[in-house]
Amino acid sequence: MDITRRWGITLPLHGLSLAEQRDVVTALPILGYTDAWSSELNGADAFTPLVLAAQWAPQLRLGTAIVGIYTRAPVSLAISAATLAGLAPGRFVMGIGTSSQVVVEQWNGIPFDKPYQRSRDMLQFLRTALSGEKVDQKYETFSVRGFRLDPTPAVPPPLALAALRPGMLKLAAKEADAAITNWLSPGDVAQVREAAGEDTELIARIFVCPTTDADLARTIGRRVLAAYLTVPVYAKFHEWLGRGQVLAPMLAAWAEGDRRGALALIPDEVVDDLVIHGSLEACRERVAQYQEAGLDTPVISLLPAPGAELSRSLRGLAPV
């Protein structure tokens, strides 16, 4: 994949319906953005925003970051990936991941079993299916019998895997074309890069709260951080990164049901490490620090702040 000087944005953008985002998305390549990456949690699905962006901004590389591999069946994932690859030949990256126990088990009632093995199996299945080969295979975590895509995408999409710790990062390096991570600081990039290796594209969602009101940004940041860092996979990620001790009081309060107390126990320095805030120029420079540290593709995720106008934020955060 071409990973030269990439600069991404997360779709859909907050505050506008999908239909209302056409003019904003069309302007992204003009501003210098190279990528648009979607996600899938409790709002829009991961594919629809990219289908629209494929038509509105044909210069952008598009990617899912990520689509869950438990909540979608293997063939369903292959068909959706092939559809988008056909709409944006050579410009679509299929990003998959396990998601989390909350999404998989609590929301969908699906056992969160063998995440490493299922990730490996899904990458191998998708690689084969998207190349046009017939799949008749019993994998460790699922089986697919007698399936062939029709039509096969003229340009099979590269694959990316959500990866937070060495096991998944090394799996991404072996079986995928890129690793996707998030909730890290510029200072964390070297550790993640070492585990992923030099030849794997490293993509990360970077959270930006465009306000010079530091107290407001930290309040917004704490709410989002608590929702993520209390999830076991993210708690273990930050323990690996060296934040285990500083986050332990917050995790203990959360486990005891003291949500408000847990928020207050996230130190300012952790918020400032993981959530970019300040002037637009300062925010843009901070995003650039991730690339200087070894990240290939920063993908900005805008955290809505009162008074932050979307078009102005996108202009101010665009690469220089």
Image (spheres, rainbow, N blue to C red):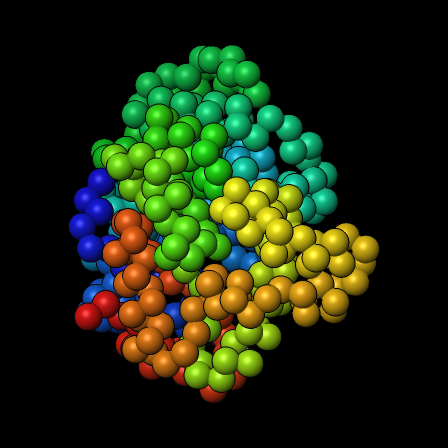
Residue 222 lies left or right of residue 61; in this view the side is right
**Occupied quadrant, residue 7:** bottom left
- Above or below, comparing residue 149 to residue 41 in the picture: above
Q: Residue furthest bottom?
A: 307
Residue 38, position as x, y percentages in the image? 42, 54
Residue 61, position as x, y percentages in the image? 27, 52
Give the total number of marks visible in the rendering. 0
* Residue that appears at 30% across and 30% down: 152
Residue 263, position as x, y percentages in the image? 67, 66
Q: Residue furthest front?
A: 245
- Above or below, comparing residue 81 to residue 261 in the picture: above
Q: Is residue 158 visible?
A: no
Identify which residue, 157 or 308, lies in the foreground: 308
Screen quadrant of the C terminus: bottom left
Residue 153, position as x, y percentages in the image? 28, 34
Identify which residue, 249 or 169, lies in the foreground: 249
Screen quadrant of the N terminus: top left
* Residue that appears at 72% across and 44% down: 106
* Residue that appears at 61% across and 56% down: 246
Q: Residue furthest right?
A: 256
Identify which residue, 146 or 94, lies in the foreground: 94
Identify which residue, 148 or 31, lies in the foreground: 31
Residue 305 lies left or right of residue 95; in this view the side is right
